[in-house]
Image: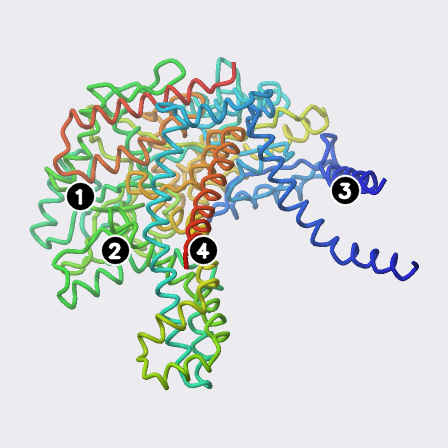
Amino acid sequence: MHKGTSTKTWAILMVSPFVLCFILFWLAPMLLGLWVSLHNWNLSSGNNGFVGLQNYVDILTPGSLYNEAFMLALKNTLVFVVISVPPLVIIALGLALVLDNLPTRLKPVFRTIYFVSYSISVTAVSAIFLWLFNENGGFINNLLVSIGILDQPINWLSEQPYAWLSILIATVWWTIGFNMMLFINALDEVDPSLYEAADLDGANAFRKFIYITLPQIKNVAFFIIIMTVIASFNLYGQSRLITAGGPEQSTTTLTMGIQNTVFGMNQLGIGSSMAILMGIIMLLVTAAQYFMSYRKKEVN
Amino acid sequence: MKSFKWLVLLIASVLVLGACSGGNNASKSKDGKIQISFINGFTGGDGAYMKKITDGFNASQDKYEIVESQEKDHYTKYKSGDYDMVVIHGNNLETYRLDGMIQEVGPLYEKAGLKESDFHQAGMDLAKLDGKLYGFPIDIHPLTMFYNKEFTQEAPKTYEDLKKLNADLQAKNKDLYALGVPSSGLVEFYMLMIAAQNGVDLQDGNALNFAQPEYADALMTFHDMVWKDKVSPAGLGLDGEFKTFMKEADSGKAVQSAIALTGPWYYAAAKEKFGDSLGVAPIPQIGKQQAAYGNAHMLAVSASVEDEEVKEGIAEFAKYMFTPENLINWADGGQAPVHLKTIEKVTAEKDKYQIAYQNSLQFDSYVAPPQVYQYGEQIRYMNEKVFSKLVGTENLTADQLMKELESATKKAQQIAETQPK
């Protein structure tokens, strides 16, 4: 009895830091955000009363100020999700495969080189890419003009589609290391005997990748795709610092829109509603991915 | 019972965290001085000069101490924090007044022994809202002209001068232009400057009205600068006016401009690069009349300050700050004070305080930003969308521009409707 109680106490003690952090940093803010989203809450004047779902109605009513801001930001964010997820996953997988085939002594060196960019702050990354993509005398333009690929410099940051391309390149360079590491770990887990059996059967590298590697890392790949979609939805630093949401608000993302609604317009209630809607959209996209993957698994 | 214990624990945690917030009573330092919290956004080069003033005040005081915070997002911190004094931009003062976040400071002028006549009228026009004083005007930072004396000895005074300068430069080198028109960044200053120089009043009640044919015509000046008269290269991005000024022309790879219509805060960087070759002057007349536009810094007092001792301390600080010997530090930092006796001191040493002096020359023709609720948000669509379209679209017609101006006006009206009743 005494032992049982002690174990239970220990269990509570061990789990309590997580539960406390979970409540403080996730559950409480989320519930508070939900509660604020149901109020006419102004950052300056405070809570001006319960309005029910009116904030959501305002955001979803075409023609309203908040609807235009939200829809524009949502469209821009979806564009980024669509253009960023494939390279962030495919390039990471490619790098992981290359590293996996390197001599054992070289692996940690290149693993560190590719991962180190992930440890740099977004401010520094943005400053580097601002310099690289500067329209007037920037490094990339100078290089491309010097070697004759371009006749005229490109307005990388103030013209589409180049602005998205600049943000995409910066994002891939910055974050690719994280996905690559996850893929490397997944590749390490693949049973070598499967490859040996395939070698005996005369399978080439491509067939081994398709029939052994991909199925074996499928679960990790699915996790990486979901995490990458979520990360791309949360695009903020790069578009804020590299293009400032431009040209013509075309890289203004949902997070930027919410930030402006709260801190620019002072509309904390509306901003919270936008954040909740953004969360719901992300949840739906993730659920759709999960459902498609699960269904495919069932069919298989 | 177990659930009840958890509930008690949760409530206790919330109460403990809640107790971390501060109150509104005057706080005192270890040596018994009354502390006055002061927040501003001077995180650039000018921060050190404001610090000189607050440090000087603290050293001179037995009774009060200014606790200064220089924060990049100082407005956000001010809204959510508990500060006694704040520096607010001239175009934000009305918003903070309507939001009930600042208080009338007329009585503090009296306590400090300051009069309206101690300041230039341009500063007073900014500080006075609805007939009452809501701030002490520190400076006005108008759109400023830098020019490179290696390309022109004289500062251009008119648009014709700009065109002539451009023709001369282009004849020498195709990568040299008179100036650069940016697509984003300081474009609000450009748009309000051209309105002022064409006598267009953008304020319509509590909202901005951009959809005026004469304003569309005025704005087309910037389109013509890039695409018709070509006094500026096309495709300059964020802060392009200053970046182009600082560049070295490089055959086909980089363009350079001889002048920059930009913010005075770039003075230190330009001076470091060009030294004595840097000229500073009031902006040229591009529209129908001479007029200057820019923003301003105002010292305002939080609406939450009720303690008389704190108010006395703020008045004492204002009395100290608005003296030529102390406010000259601000001019030393490149800002143009509107305190008349400090202007006199600046004028007496105009070579030393080059930029403050040149900008003080623009005060007489200065046109203040429209005093409307959420001015920054009302003009956001113009800043982020319309101007970049205006200078970035070669075949833009007046009709297309007018449609954008109508959209911008509609958004401004919607923002104005959020004004507290």
Closer-to-camera residue (A285/A119): A285
- Looking at the rendered structure, which numbered label has been put on residue B55? none
Q: Which residue is mark 1?
A: B232
Measured as percent of width and height from the top left, residue A203 is found at 32, 80
Q: Is there any visible trace of residue A177 in the rendered image? A: yes
Q: Secondary structure at mark 3?
A: helix
Query: Mark 4 and mark 1, same subunit?
Result: no
Q: Which residue is mark 4?
A: A298
Q: Chain of mark 3?
A: B
Measured as percent of width and height from the top left, residue B165 is found at 13, 43
Query: Mark 1 and mark 2, same subunit?
Result: yes
The amino acid type found where label 2 is placed reads Lys
- Residue at 45 percent across and 55 percent down: it is A298
**Most distant residue in the left direction:** B171
Q: Which residue is mark 3?
A: B13
* CA separation in Å, label 2 and label 4: 62 Å
* CA separation in Å, label 3 and label 4: 46 Å
- Looking at the rendered structure, which numbered label has been put on residue B247? 2
Q: Secondary structure at mark 4?
A: helix
Does A250 appear above or below B196?
below
Query: Mark 2 and mark 4, same subunit?
Result: no
Q: Secondary structure at mark 2?
A: loop
The amino acid type found where label 3 is placed reads Ser
**Quadrant position of the N terminus of chain B in the picture:** top right
* CA separation in Å, label 4 and label 1: 63 Å
Query: Mark 3 and mark 4, same subunit?
Result: no
Of mark 2 and mark 3, the one earlier in the sequence is 3
